[in-house]
Amino acid sequence: MKTLVVAGNPKPESRTLDAGLRLARLLAGPGAGEPGVIDVITLGPGLLGWGDETVRSAVASAAGTDLLVVASPTFKATYTGVLKLFLDQFATGDGLAGVTAVPLMLGAAPTHSLAPELHLKPVLVELGATCPAPGLYQIDKTYADDGTAEAYSRRWASALTATATQGRN
C-alpha cells in the first residue's frame, strides 16, 4: 500500500507536515515503510499557473497513491491558500479517483474542530477521493503528545487501509 502525506502549510517542514507523517505512519502500520511527502510550499511559483512539470509530478504522485493524508493548518477557519492552489491542479470528479484520503487539520484551539469535516473533506470528495472516516483535528501545540492520532488510528486504521487497498481494484 502506497501512503503519501500532502502538507499545505506556508512554512516548509512544518508541524503540519510532522502531524501528517505521524498519522500516516500510524494508519499504515508497522513495516509499511516511510510515507511519501509533498510539502506543497516547496513547489513554489509553479502552483500559480498550469503546466509546471514539478507540480504535475506532485499531482501524479498524489493521484497514484493508495492512502493520502492531506494536512493543513487552520487559517480563517479553513485550509490554507497554498493547499487550495495545489488541489486546484486536480481534475474535478476523478483527479483523486481510487485514492483513500484522510483530511487532517491543526489549529490553536478546539474552536475550529469541525474544519476538516466541513471544509477539507468536501473538496477531497469533489476531486474523486474516498473519505470513509471523519477528518481529524488536532491542537497544534499538543498533537505530538495528546494521543489523538493514536486514538484515531485505533478507531479508523482498519477501515481506511481496507478501503485504500481495494481502491485500485
Image (tube, helix red, strand yellow):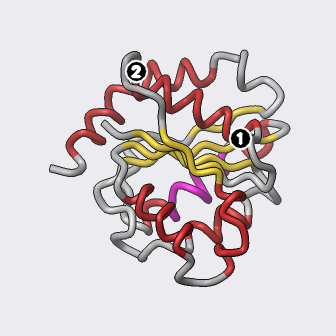
| Measured Cα–Cα span from mark 2 to mark 1 | 20 Å
- Residue toward you, 141 or 47: 47
Write the start and end of the magenta stretch as one range.
Answer: 114-123
In the rendered view, tell whether residue 92 sits above or below residue 114.
Answer: below
Instruction: Determine the residue positioned at 72% across, 26% down.
Output: 143
Considering the image in quadrants, where does the N terminus appear? top left
In the rendered view, tell whether residue 115 sits above or below residue 48.
Answer: above
Q: Provide the secondary structure element on which disc 2 rests.
A: loop
* Left or right of 14 on screen, residue 154: left
Magenta stretch contains residue 119: yes
Picture coordinates of residue 58, whole percent (x, y): 50, 61
* Left or right of 103 on screen, residue 67: left
Circle 2 sits on which residue?
Answer: 29
Q: Residue furthest bottom?
A: 50
Circle 1 sits on which residue?
Answer: 16
Pointer 1 local density, CA inside 10 Å: few below 14, some 14–19, many at least 20: many
